[in-house]
Image (cartoon, grey):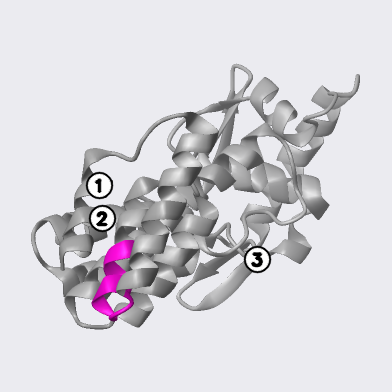
Amino acid sequence: MPLRIYLTGRVLVEDNGTILLGERRLMGRQGRLVFAHLVSEHLRAVSRDELAETLWPDAVPPSWERSLSALISKLRALLAGVGVPDVALTGSFGHYQLLLPADVWIDAEAASAAIDRAESALRKGKPRDAWGWAQAAYQISRRSFLMGEEGPWVTLKRSELREVLVRAHECLSEPSIWHAEPGYAVKHAKETVSIEPFRETSYQLLMRAHAAVGNRAEALRVYERCRNLLSEELGVPPSPRTEAVYLDILRS
């Protein structure tokens, strides 16, 4: 079993089912932030300035270089002390990189890969496969990322996970319609609309799901809600695809 690193929910490192490193040992919020940043960007070297902006998004203190060096030293010693296998924290020319095993499993990366596979399965007409991969992406992306932290980098990572979550809801909704489980389709499509109210593909799914369960009038109401929102907020009509779904339901 590969080394597993979790950045959503509780931050921790696990090897063969044993927790090697948890949040309590990560030297407080700053240690957790540095670790999460280096894990997320492990494929490249991260500059000291970039780490400083993550740690102190409002204002970098005068002594930031000394403070960052101390954090890096403590993190390097911590990783060595708990025996995390095949991991090295390197530093040169004002940059740091966390070298991880080639087969490392990182939850946020796994969620992104899973939703890509789910969407690919849908395109190939394999809804059961899509459901499984979408569930994996959903279970990870619904968890919080570094709860209690703020700043541009944290916001960016949360935005990326939110996009995975929206795509997972859509991928879970589509197979539910195919397999005559429109109640689940309605649930997931509603969640998507609540997260991204201007995402027309979610309205299309919600309309189809309501129609599949027999709520034709509710499906038409969803269209009206979408049309009014786009008109009032953006001054544009629904897309041709949304119109087509609406007309199919109207004629049914």
Cα gap from disc 1 to disc 2, whole angstroms: 5 Å
The label nearer to you, 3 versus 1, is 1
Q: Is residue 236 visible?
A: yes
Q: Residue at x 47, y 54 (%)?
A: 108
Where does residue 47 sit, x and y in percent of width and height?
Answer: 61, 23
User: Where residue 243 is drawn, which disc sits there?
Assistant: 1
Give the position of the C terminus as an image quadrant.
bottom left
**Residue that numbered label 2 is attached to:** 246
**Residue that numbered label 3 is attached to:** 10
Q: Residue at x 62, y 47 (%)?
A: 36
Magenta residues span 206-215
* Category of crowding for the residue at label 3, using alpha-carbon neighbours closer than 10 angstroms: few (below 14), some (14–19), many (at least 20): some
Q: Are marks 1 and 2 in contact (CB under 8 Å)?
A: yes
Which residue type carries mark 1? Glu
Which residue type carries mark 3? Arg
Where does residue 84 sit, x and y in percent of width and height?
Answer: 55, 60
Magenta region's main secondary structure?
helix
Frontmost residue, 227 versus 54: 227
| Residue 234 to residue 102: above or below | above
